[in-house]
Image (spheres, rainbow, N blue to C red):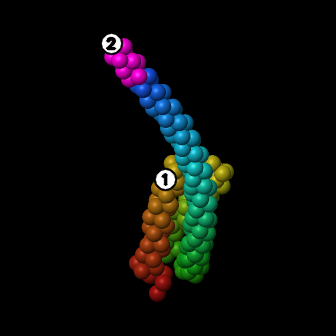
Amino acid sequence: MKTNMLSSLVIVIMIGIISIGCGSTSTEKSKLTKENTEDANANLNQVKKESQEEFKVKAKVDWKTFNKASQKAIKKQEIQIEKIKLKISKVNKEEAQKFSSALDTLEQKKNSLKQRLAQINKKIKTNMKHINESDEVIKRAFEKSFVNDMNELIIGIRDFWKTNSINK
């Protein structure tokens, strides 16, 4: 019986030692996991910050490029409208009145484009430090709309020259 008790006691002590040993390994693994998670979060935050900065720089460069090209396109259309005005000034008053309404429509469209570009440019410059993805979506929508309207103006001017006898 003493051997049985002694064996049981040895088994209980062995189980206790194994349990304590496993417990400390689990605690060490938990600490290591926690440290790894903290390091991963710190790295993720750094990557996120760098990505946001890259996004802002790219958005700024893209906008400057678009704005500059748009201003050049508007200036080019202003020159075309001035050429039309010059041609109209050389025809008789009856013909000039006929051309004036078409010219007024073209000039209104040009002025609208110029004003819209100035407004969005002011807004974007104000928000450039805090630009985010939703601002980028709004900017892209504006750019698409602006390009479509600019194309309509260009086509309108081209059609004016084609369809009116003023060019002949």
Seen as rendered, the residue at the extreme bottom is: 168
Q: Residues within 10 Å of mark 1 (few under 14, many from 20)?
A: few
Q: Camera-side residue: 34 or 151?
A: 34
Q: What residue appears at the point 60 percent right and 73 percent down from the top-left corner?
A: 72
Residue 10 in magenta stretch: yes
47 is higher (above) or lower (below) than 98: above
- What secondary structure is the magenta-colored segment mainly? helix
- Residue 54 x, y percent position in the rendering: 59, 59
- Residue 162 x, y percent position in the rendering: 42, 80
Disc 2: which residue: 1
Disc 1: which residue: 137
- Residue 48 x, y percent position in the rendering: 56, 50
**Mark 2 residue type:** Met
Seen as rendered, the residue at the extreme top is: 1
**Mark 1 residue type:** Val
| Magenta region, residue range | 2-12
Image quadrant assignment for residue 158: bottom left
Is disc 1 placed on a helix, strand or loop? helix
Q: Camera-side residue: 52 or 9?
A: 9
Q: What residue appears at the point 44 percent right and 72 percent down from the top-left corner?
A: 155
First reached walking from the N terminus: tag 1 or tag 2? 2
Q: What residue appears at the point 51 percent right and 48 percent down from the top-left corner?
A: 134
Left or right: residue 23 versus residue 120 is left
17 is higher (above) or lower (below) than 101: above
Q: Camera-side residue: 80 or 142?
A: 142
